[in-house]
Every structure is written in C-alpha cells, then in structure tokens.
Image (cartoon, rainbow, N blue to C red):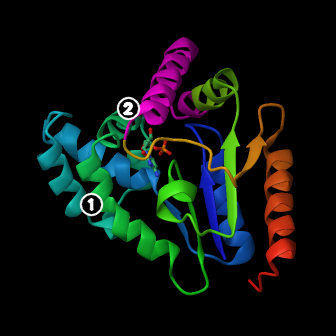
Amino acid sequence: MIIAIDGPAASGKGTLARRLAVHYGLPHLDTGLLYRAVGSAALARAIPFDDADALGRIAAGLDVAALDPEALKAGPVGEAASRVAAVPQVRAALLRLQQDFARQPGGAVLDGRDIATVIAPDAQVKIFVTASPEVRAERRYREFAGRGDTASYDEVLADIRRRDERDSGRASAPLVRAPDAVLLDNSALDRDQSWQAALAIVEAKRRETGSAT
Ligand code: DC
C-alpha cells in the first residue's frame, strides 16, 4: 500500500505520515528533507537561487543516507527549500529517487507537496492535509520557541504565507490537492483527533480497495 500525504507547511502532515508508517509497518520518506538539503547546501555554498544548473547538480549528488533532519528543520532552511523546489532541474533530479522509494515492495508512506499528483499518482491512499495559515503559524511558532528560536508569531505567519504562495504558484509540480485525495482540514482538531481522522481515511480506503497490507 502506498500512502501519499500532501499539504502546506506546518499542516501536521509529517507527524501523521510518521505515525501511519509506524502503524502499518511501512517505510516513510519525508520528501521535504530532500529539498531542505538542497536549500541548505545552496546557502552554505552561496549558490544563487536562480543558478538552476548548479542547484540541479547539488540535487543529483545528494547523499540521502547522510541527511540530518534536526539541522534541516531550522527556520531559514525552509525558505531556501521552497526557493530551490521551484527549480525544474532540482525536481527532475529528485524524481527517480522518490518514485523508487514509493514503489518498493510492500509499499511506503511519503509526505510532501506533489506525492499524489507527480511522485505516486497510483497511490491507494491520498490525503491532503491542511489547516488555516493562522493555525499553522501558531503551531510553528510554538515549535520554534520550544527550540529557543526568537522569531515572532507575525514573522512565522508571513513566512508561511510566502511559502504557501510560492509552493502553490510555481509552474513545476505545484502544491495542489489531487482530485482523488481526501481532504483533512485539522484547523479545529487536536493532534489525536487529527490522527484518528487520518486513520479513518486510510481504513476506509483499505476496505474499499481490499488492500492486504
Ligand atoms: O514539508 P517541508 O516544509 O519540509 O518542505 C520544505 C519545502 O520543500 C517546501 O516549502 C516546498 C518544498 N517541497 C516540495 O516542493 N515538494 C515536496 N514534495 C516536498 C517539499
């Protein structure tokens, strides 16, 4: 069973994807980390965000086993990731790796922006997780504050709106809900309610498709 989870920044899609992977015993790929790694390398090497060929080369040479999720989750890396993710050469270089991950025997859980539309359009389960920008900013703000980050709520909200606009407005594989994806708006749900809603969506799909996994 392939479970595709898409949604904007801080929608809670990563938490749900991780938990679904554990629940069903499936491998999980947080595809945002790939773009974050390219963005982080671009920042470190001072490569301009319009140097598509250089960014594409970084993406093609990415060592996925060496990614450090903790370091890549830091604030400025998210913005850089969103910038490099709009570059078609970067997306092309990361495509095969993600498709191979999705198609491994037994299936997988992947979360990102274009999983249901581009990476695994054949996924049995597609969930589009979202929440209002204000709710997402509040969550991200608390998360950053917990790590000692000094960004204000207004700065976090502005960053989220900017990334939403760029991720949804780009020409190459924009963030969009696949027509057959189930919408999970968790604006008014706590973590556990959101988990129960996601689980109910997967279970309903499993019954519908008779999935053995
Ligand atoms: O999910 P995240 O916040 O870690 O993603 C960081 C950025 O990477 C996001 O702003 C857009 C980009 N991204 C993408 O374009 N496609 C994906 N499948 C995953 C992430």
Mark 2, ligand 1, within 8 Å: the answer is yes
Q: Residue furthest front?
A: 179
Identify the element where label 1 is drawn.
helix
Query: At 42% from the left edge and 53% from the top edge, which residue is drawn?
Result: 33
Name the foreground residue: 193 vs 207.
207
Name the foreground residue: 87 vs 193.
87
Instruction: State the image quarter where residue 170 is shown.
Output: top left
Q: Is residue 54 visible?
A: yes
Mark 1, ligand 1, within 8 Å: the answer is no
Q: Quadrant of ligand 1?
A: top left
Name the foreground residue: 44 vs 170.
170
Which percent across, then down, holds residue 46? 13, 36
Pointer 2 or 1: first along the chain: 2
- Residue density around tag 2, few if under 14, some if 14–19, many if 20 or more, within 10 Å: some
60 left or right of 101 in image: left
Type of amino acid under label 2: Glu
Q: Which residues are magenta?
A: 143-171
Which percent across, then down, holds residue 10? 60, 37
102 left or right of 207 in image: left
- Residue 133 counted in the magenta span: no
What residue did someone put label 2 on? 79
Identify the element where label 2 is drawn.
helix
- Residue 151 counted in the magenta span: yes
Q: Quadrant of the N terminus?
A: bottom right
- Residue density around tag 1, few if under 14, some if 14–19, many if 20 or more, within 10 Å: some
What residue did someone put label 1 on? 93
Query: At 80% from the left edge and 47% from the top edge, which residue is drawn?
Result: 194
In the rendered view, tell whether residue 79 sits above or below residue 89: above
